[in-house]
């Protein structure tokens, strides 16, 4: 990490990769695939969308990184990968840009990468039950990354034609529950 200052503003920049891919992985059963990992800055487990740096393991574009990270962190893969949006992850703290992808239908096709086993816990949660599930996890001490909700919003509103009627129905049920 580089610690930089511009016009009196302090921020960080990754040395190896300046972009991340974040994946909204939805199963054919209306579930979302999430990753839970202890994060030292939070001093707590953080539940988030599967994500990772683009190009930190060699040359790749953001869609290749999204497929790689989904497989490494969760053991899942998806037939379709659709770019949803790109923007800053924390504009006041970091120069990192995040590209959101919709991966569907996500299916478990193997094991997590060896370096993620025992470090990242995978959750497959019905989208309709996600608000209640997230509240329970928070009560247990986990931090819920709000980019989960942003990713679901993008998946529901930005690319509705890219998704099946089943996923739209599951996402609308979540809105009624939440």
Image (spheres, helix red, strand yellow):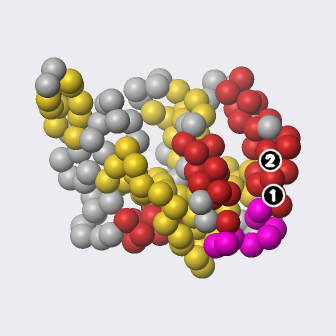
Label 1 near label 2: C-beta < 8 Å? yes
**In the image as oriented, which residue stretches furthest toward the top?**
8
Residue 124 image label: none
Residue 61, horizontal then vertical, whole percent: 33, 69
Residue 20, horizontal then vertical, whole percent: 37, 53
Helix or strand or loop: what does disc 2 sit on? helix
Magenta: predominant secondary structure element? helix
Residue 174 image label: 2
Q: Is residue 116 left or right of residue 163?
A: left
Q: What's the CA distance linking mark 2 and mark 1?
A: 6 Å
Q: Is residue 36 visible?
A: no
Determine if the magenta segment contains residue 166: yes
Residue 172, horizontal then vertical, whole percent: 81, 53
Q: Residue at x 79, y 45 (%)?
A: 175
Residue 170 image label: 1
Q: Tell me the quarter of the picture where residue 54 sits.
A: bottom left
Q: Residue at x 77, y 54 (%)?
A: 171
Determine if the magenta segment contains residue 81: no
Q: Is residue 22 left or right of residue 55?
A: right
Q: Tell me the quarter of the picture where residue 10 sits.
A: top left
Q: Is residue 88 left or right of residue 74?
A: left
Neighbourhood count class around disc 2 (C-alpha, 10 Å): few under 14, some 14–19, many 20 upward: some
Residue 80, horizontal then vertical, whole percent: 58, 76
Q: Residue at x 33, y 30 (%)?
A: 92
**In the image as oriented, which residue stretches furthest toward the bottom?**
79
* Quarter of the image with the N terminus in it: top left
The segment highlighted magenta reads 161-168
Helix or strand or loop: what does disc 1 sit on? helix
Residue 113 sits above or below residue 81 on the image: above
Q: Nearer the viewer, residue 80 or 168?
A: 168
């Amino acid at each position: 990490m580089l610690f930089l200052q511009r016009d009196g503003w302090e921020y960080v920049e990754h040395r190896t990769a300046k972009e991340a891919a974040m994946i909204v992985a939805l199963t054919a059963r209306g579930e979302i695939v999430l990753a839970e990992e202890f994060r030292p800055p939070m001093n707590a487990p953080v539940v988030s969308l599967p994500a990772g740096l683009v190009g930190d393991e060699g040359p790749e574009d953001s869609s290749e990184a999204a497929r790689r990270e989904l497989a490494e962190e969760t053991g899942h893969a998806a037939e379709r990968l659709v770019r949803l949006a790109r923007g800053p992850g924390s504009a006041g703290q970091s120069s990192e840009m995040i590209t959101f992808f919709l991966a569907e239908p996500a299916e478990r096709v193997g094991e997590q990468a060896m370096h993620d086993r025992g470090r990242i816990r995978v959750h497959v949660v019905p989208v309709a039950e996600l608000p209640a599930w997230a509240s329970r996890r928070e009560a247990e001490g986990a931090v819920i990354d709000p980019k989960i909700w942003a990713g679901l919003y993008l998946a529901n509103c930005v690319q509705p034609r890219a998704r099946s009627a089943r996923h739209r129905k599951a996402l609308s049920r979540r809105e009624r529950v939440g």
